[in-house]
Amino acid sequence: MIFSWYLNIPFHFLVPAFCGVIDVPLVVRRLHKSREEVRKDLGVPNDVKLVIFNFGGQPAGWKLKEEYLPASWLCLVCGALDNQELPPNFIKLAKDVYTPDLIAASDCMLGKIGYGTVSEAMAYKLPFIFIRRDYFNEEPYLREMLEYYQGGVEMARRDMLSGCWIPYLERAVNLKLCYEGGTNGGEVWNSQFIFLKISGSSFPPKSLGVKVPIAVLRAEIDNIAPPELLKQYDEALTSQSKVISNNILMKE
């Protein structure tokens, strides 16, 4: 299969082999519950500091100790082994838990750097304490994003393993993330893809200036693919689909 265009997400790296480029905002999973609802389900008061321990949900048998956290803090653990015993200030999460809700309900996150964790930390303004990943090609661009939006603290691997977490946690909760870009990249890509497939065009259409205010998370301030343009795509695709369906019925 030969591709003629590709998608650019924020802080992408250049791929000069492609001549067609579609810029999209961050791609993140939507929230199902509010911060208050999640904390109520967990039995965690709103004034308690909460860190989510997130290394991709992969069971690793981490050795976690009560003294790793500041007094009165709690830690949500993703990917804990079924038979793993945790200290009283660590909470084992179910394997099928919906992570974005927990990320948005936390005060900071400790985990490995990756697109999913970084994009959702940015979207929900969650300070991210990350561990360096050797030989991971995406890392320089993700680190740049965290630094640019003042959202990341790098933790030395030895400090993570030895339990020297408190200085990093205290620093992270004082960060003020300044990301205000769009987070509806999935919707943007979907509309672009459908248009390209139906129209047979090699590139997405240009905006016709439709001015209909719609709020899709923070997409109303997205200059790349504003909701007005998405609404226009939807109307055009709906109309085009009816034409195609009518043509098929006429042929039959």
Image (cartoon, rainbow, N blue to C red):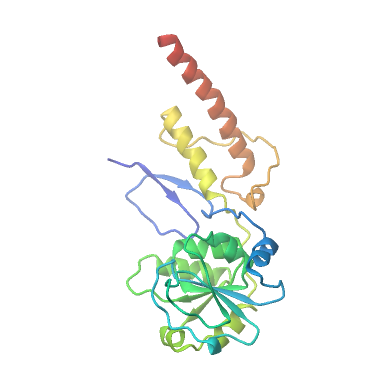
Spot occupied by residue 44 in the image (x, y as percentages of width and height):
66, 72
Above or below, 38 relative to 23: below
Task: Choose between 46 and 210: the one closer to the eye.
Answer: 46
Residue displayed at 54% across by 44% down: 187
In the picture, the quarter occupied by the C terminus is: top left
Residue 174: quadrant of the picture:
bottom right
Residue 178 visible in rendering = no
Against 218, is 91 above or below?
A: below
**Measured from the top left, where is residue 7 in percent x and y?**
43, 48
At x 58%, y 72%, the residue is 127
On the image, the x and y values in percent for residue 27 come to 51, 53
Toward which corner of the image does residue 231 lie, by quadrant? top right
Point out the residue furthest to the front here.
83
Quadrant of res 122: bottom right
Count every numbered label the image shows and give the total: 0
Where is the N terminus found, in terms of image quarters?
A: top left
Looking at the picture, tell me which residue is in the foreground, 223 or 53: 53
* Residue plotted at (50% across, 24% down): 241
Q: Position of residue 80 (x, y in %)?
A: 45, 72
**Quick check: 17 above or below 235?**
below
Q: Which residue is farthest left? A: 1
The answer to whether 72 is drawn above or below residue 217 in the figure is: below
| Residue at x 35%, y 66% (from the top left corner) | 137
204 vs 122, left or right, is left
* 39 relative position to 158: left or right: right
Residue 246 visible in the snapshot: yes
Q: Is residue 133 left or right of residue 170?
A: left
